Amino acid sequence: MVTFIEMQAFARECQEWAQRTSNSSHRQTILGIADTWMRTAFALEQAVTNGAELALPDLRSKLD
C-alpha cells in the first residue's frame, strides 16, 4: 500500500514538475494533482492516527 509519506513525496514531486513547465494549463493540472495527493495523505494519516485499519490490499503486488 502507498503510505501517506509516499503520497506527500508524490505531491512534492508534482509541485516540482509544475514549477518547471511553462504551460499554465499544465501547471494548474499538475498542481491540482499535487493537492489531491496532499489531501489524501492527510486524510490517511488522520485515519491511521485515530486507529483506523487500512482495508485495501497492496495493489502493487498484483502488478508483478
Image (cartoon, grey):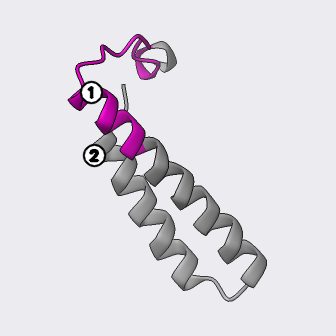
Q: Which residues are magenta?
A: 41-61
How many residues crowd mark 2 within 10 Å: few (<14), some (14–19), many (20+)?
Answer: some
Task: Looking at the picture, tell me which residue is in the foreground, 64 or 55.
Answer: 55
Q: Please provide percent x and percent y for residue 35.
A: 53, 59
Seen in the image, is 21 located left or right of residue 62? right
Q: Please provide percent x and percent y for residue 42.
A: 37, 45
Q: Which mark is residue 34?
A: none
Using the rendered view, name the quadrant where residue 9 is placed: bottom left
Judging by the rendered image, the residue that carries numbered circle 2 is 5
The amino acid type found where label 1 is placed reads Val
Task: Looking at the picture, tell me which residue is in the foreground, 50 or 42.
Answer: 50
Residue that extends furthest to the right in the rendered view of this protein: 25
Residue drawn where x is 32% and y is 45% of the image:
6
Secondary structure found at label 2? helix
From this view, report whether residue 29 is shown above or below residue 33: below
Q: Which mark is residue 48?
A: 1
Q: Please provide percent x and percent y for residue 7.
A: 39, 46
Q: Quadrant of the C terminus?
A: top left
Residue drawn where x is 35% and y is 16% of the image:
54
Using the rendered view, name the quadrant where residue 28 is placed: bottom right
